[in-house]
Image (cartoon, helix red, strand yellow):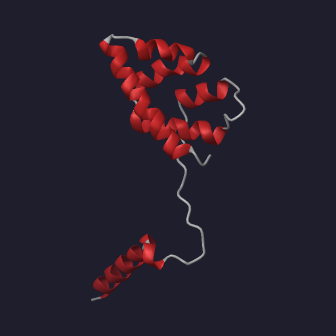
Amino acid sequence: MFRYALLLSAATALCACGGSPQLRTPGVAQTAAIPFASGPIANACLAEGRRDATRARCGCIQAAADQTLSQADQQRGVPFFREPGKLQVVRQSDARGNERFWEAWSRFADHARAVCSRT
């Protein structure tokens, strides 16, 4: 009997942790966590010294890259932080590998823009 009471208490406590949108406190702002990661994209982002390239923003961009790009595509994209104009050459190329990379990079950019706009 004690085991069942303990199990029921643990389950109740676990369920209480999740919360429900209807149970949120009115008037208290709810914020979503901004993702952060480190890696080649974040390093390239910070290395170029752009005014808006903060550690938080570059880390968020890396997290978006981790969600949308392969490691190979991340490595391939690193030089474009230094010379963004070279990305236009890839975009205009008819080579299938470049087309595939451009599609992946575009999805990454859209995702990063949506996720990291608050950083």
Q: What residue do we see at 52% from left, 13% from top?
A: 86
**In this view of the protein, which residue sits in the foreground, 85 or 74?**
85
Q: Looking at the picture, how far across and down is residue 11, in whole percent?
A: 35, 77
* In the rendered image, the vertical position of residue 47 relative to residue 53, given as above or below: above
Q: Looking at the picture, how far across and down is residue 33, in whole percent?
A: 54, 55
* In the rendered image, the vertical position of residue 116 relative to residue 77, given as above or below: below
Of all residues, the one furthest to the bottom in this rendering is 1
Quadrant (top left, top right, bottom left, bottom right) of the N terminus: bottom left
65 horizontally vs 119: left or right? left
Of all residues, the one furthest to the front in this rendering is 92
Rendered image quadrant of residue 4: bottom left
Q: What residue do we see at 56% from left, 61% from top?
A: 31
* In the rendered image, the vertical position of residue 18 relative to residue 71, given as above or below: below
Q: What residue do we see at 61% from left, 28% from top?
A: 45
38 horizontally vs 20: left or right? right
Asked if one can make out residue 62 in the rendered structure from this viewpoint, the answer is yes
Q: What residue do we see at 44% from left, 36% from top?
A: 66
